[in-house]
Image (tube, helix red, strand yellow):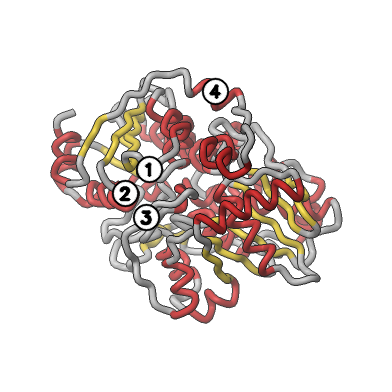
C-alpha cells in the first residue's frame, strides 16, 4: 500500500518510508491511499475472537501487503500480551481500561507495535546505521515510547518533554531508563517540544548526519494500531448484548487516538458517533462550533496529556473527511471542561460508583453523562491509571491512591535528563555534537 501526504505536495511513499521517515517532505502527515473495509464475517464473529486475533485482522488490512504474514502476526501478538477490559461504571456508561500495559497508559500498544515494525524494516535493510527516534511528550507518550523501544538494537530514542509540566511519576518512566533512551527537558510547553521535532525532520544538515524518525502519533505506525482498542471494545460489548447504538468518547489532545477510532469506523466498525472530550485546550471543540481552526499556545491543566494547542492529527481528520466541516460534525461532537469540572467529575464518580477515573478519563465520562441519549450505550477511553496522577487525584478524592508495582519500580531509578531551551538552534547543536 502507498501512503500520501496530507499536504498533497510530496511523492507517494511505501510503508517502510512512511514509518522510517515519520513526516513527509512537505511537512504533511502520511495517510494510507485507501482504507479497507473488513468483511461482514469478521464482525459477525468478533465476539468469539481474542484481542490478539482481532488486532491481527485489523493490522493486516493496513500492513499485510508490505510485511511478511508471519512477521506481522508475531509483531501483533508480542505487542498485545495484555488485555484492556470494558468495565461498567454507571447505567449504560462503560470504561475501556487502556492502562494494563507496561507503562499503564493507552499508548503502550502503538509504541510497542511501532518499535517492532521499525526494527523489522531495519533488519530487512540489513544496515548498521542507527535510527534516531525523536518524540515529543505531554505525559504518557514519552513513557510508552521509551519503554516500547528500550533495549531495541539499532534504535536510539530522544524524549522531549516540557519542564515541570508532566507528573512526577510520568517523568520517572522515561528519565530513569538509560540504555538507548535519552530524556531532553525543554524549557517550554508541549507545543514547543513538538515544534522542535518537526523542525528537526525538515533540517537538511541534521538529516544528512543522522537517520531521524518520530514515534509521536504523527507516525502511521504509532496511531493506526490504536484502532485495535475500538474493535476490542465493540467485541466485549457484543458479548454482553450492549453493542447497539454505540457512542465512543475519546479524551483528546493530539487527536491520534480518536483519529484511529475514526479509521476503525471507516473500516466498518459499527460506532454510531464519537465525542472528542477536551480539557481547557479547546481548539478542536471551537472548530466544531465555528468551522474555523485557530491553533494557539497550550494551557497547562490537570489533564496534562491533553495540553495541546495545535493537535497534529487534525490534519488527518480534516483529510479523512474531505476537508468538510459538515462531514466531520456528522460523526464527531465535542466537549470541553475546566480543571474544576474535571475534579468535580472524579470526585462524583468515585463517591457514587467507587470507580476512580484519572483526569483524562473523567473528561470522557462527563461528556457521555451529559450527552448520551437514553437508547445509546457509551464507552469512554480510560487512558491511564489514576496513580500516574497520584498527587492530583488524592487531593481531589481525599484518600490515598495505591501505586501499582509497575509504577513503583520506575520511581526507584535516578533521574537523568538533558536541559535545553525551546530554541531550535540549541536542539540542533546538541544533536550535531552527538
Secondary structure at badge 4 equals helix
User: Are discs 2 and 1 less than 8 Å apart at CB?
Assistant: yes
x and y percent of residue 236 in the render? 77, 49
User: Are discs 3 and 4 less than 8 Å apart at CB?
Assistant: no
Secondary structure at badge 1 equals loop
Residue linked to disc 2: 189
Disc 2 crowd rating (10 Å Cα; few below 14, some 14-19, many 20+) is: many
Secondary structure at badge 2 equals loop
Q: How many marks?
A: 4
In the image, what residue occupies the spot 52% across and 64% down? 336
Residue linked to disc 4: 408
**Disc 4 to disc 1, C-alpha distance:** 20 Å
Given residues 170 and 181, the one toward you in this image is 170
In which quadrant of the rendered view does residue 276 lie?
A: bottom right
**Disc 2 to disc 3, C-alpha distance:** 32 Å
Q: Which residue is situated farthest in the right direction here? A: 241
Disc 1 crowd rating (10 Å Cα; few below 14, some 14-19, many 20+) is: many
Q: Is residue 243 left or right of residue 38?
A: right
In which quadrant of the rendered view does residue 72 lie?
A: top right
Disc 4 crowd rating (10 Å Cα; few below 14, some 14-19, many 20+) is: some
In the image, what residue occupies the spot 45% across and 65% down? 282
Given residues 30 and 363, the one toward you in this image is 363
User: Are discs 2 and 3 less than 8 Å apart at CB?
Assistant: no
Question: Which tag, 2 or 4, sits closer to the chain's start?
Answer: 2
Residue 260 in view (yes/no): no
Residue linked to disc 1: 165
Say if 143 sits above or below 56 in the image: above
In the image, what residue occupies the spot 63% across and 29% down? 402
Q: Is residue 118 left or right of residue 354?
A: left
Say if 205 sits above or below 281 in the image: above
Residue linked to disc 3: 13
Amino acid at each position: 500500500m502507498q501512503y500520501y501526504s496530507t499536504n498533497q505536495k510530496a511523492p507517494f511513499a511505501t510503508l517502510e518510508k512512511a514509518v522510517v521517515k515519520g513526516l513527509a517532505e512537505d511537512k504533511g502527515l502520511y495517510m494510507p491511499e485507501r482504507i479497507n473495509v473488513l468483511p461482514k464475517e469478521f464482525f459477525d464473529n468478533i465476539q468469539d475472537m481474542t484481542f490478539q486475533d482481532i488486532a491481527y485482522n485489523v493490522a493486516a488490512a493496513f500492513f499485510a501487503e508490505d510485511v511478511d504474514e508471519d512477521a506481522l502476526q508475531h509483531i501483533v501478538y508480542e505487542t498485545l500480551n495484555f488485555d484492556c477490559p470494558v468495565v461498567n461504571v454507571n447505567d449504560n456508561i462503560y470504561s475501556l481500561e487502556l492502562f494494563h500495559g507496561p507503562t499503564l497508559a493507552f499508548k503502550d500498544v502503538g509504541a510497542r507495535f511501532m518499535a517492532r515494525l521499525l526494527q523489522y524494516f531495519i533488519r530487512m535493510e540489513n544496515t548498521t546505521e542507527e535510527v534516531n527516534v525523536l518524540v515529543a511528550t505531554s505525559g504518557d507518550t514519552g513513557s510508552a515510547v521509551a519503554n516500547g523501544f528500550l533495549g531495541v538494537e539499532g534504535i536510539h530514542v530522544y524524549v522531549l518533554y516540557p519542564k515541570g509540566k508532566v507528573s512526577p511519576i510520568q517523568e520517572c518512566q522515561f528519565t530513569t531508563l538509560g540504555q538507548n533512551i535519552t530524556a531532553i527537558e525543554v524549557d517550554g510547553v508541549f507545543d514547543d517540544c513538538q515544534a522542535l521535532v518537526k523542525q528537526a525532520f525538515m533540517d537538511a544538515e541534521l538529516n544528512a548526519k543522522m537517520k531521524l524518525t518520530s514515534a509521536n502519533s504523527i507516525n502511521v505506525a504509532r496511531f493506526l494500531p490504536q484502532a485495535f482498542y475500538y474493535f476490542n471494545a465493540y467485541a466485549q460489548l457484543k458479548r454482553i448484548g450492549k453493542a447497539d447504538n454505540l457512542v465512543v468518547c475519546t479524551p483528546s489532545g493530539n487527536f491520534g487516538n480518536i483519529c484511529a477510532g475514526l479509521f476503525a469506523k471507516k473500516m466498518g466498525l459499527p460506532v454510531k458517533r464519537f465525542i472528542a472530550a477536551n480539557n481547557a485546550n479547546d481548539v478542536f471543540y471551537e472548530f466544531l462550533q465555528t468551522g474555523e481552526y485557530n491553533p494557539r499556545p497550550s494551557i497547562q491543566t490537570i489533564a496534562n496529556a491533553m495540553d495541546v494547542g495545535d493537535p497534529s492529527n487534525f490534519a488527518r481528520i480534516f483529510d479523512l473527511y474531505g476537508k468538510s466541516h459538515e462531514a466531520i460534525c456528522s460523526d464527531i461532537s465535542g466537549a470541553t471542561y475546566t480543571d474544576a469540572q474535571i475534579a468535580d467529575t472524579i470526585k462524583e464518580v468515585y463517591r457514587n460508583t467507587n470507580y476512580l477515573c484519572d483526569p483524562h478519563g473523567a473528561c470522557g465520562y462527563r461528556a457521555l453523562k451529559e450527552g448520551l441519549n437514553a437508547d445509546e450505550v457509551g464507552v469512554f477511553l480510560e487512558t491511564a491509571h489514576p496513580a500516574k496522577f497520584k498527587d492530583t487525584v488524592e487531593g481531589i478524592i481525599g484518600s490515598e491512591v495505591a501505586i501499582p508495582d509497575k509504577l513503583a519500580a520506575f520511581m526507584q531509578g535516578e533521574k537523568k535528563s538533558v536541559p535545553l531551551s525551546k530554541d531550535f538552534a540549541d536542539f540542533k547543536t546538541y544533536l550535531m555534537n552527538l
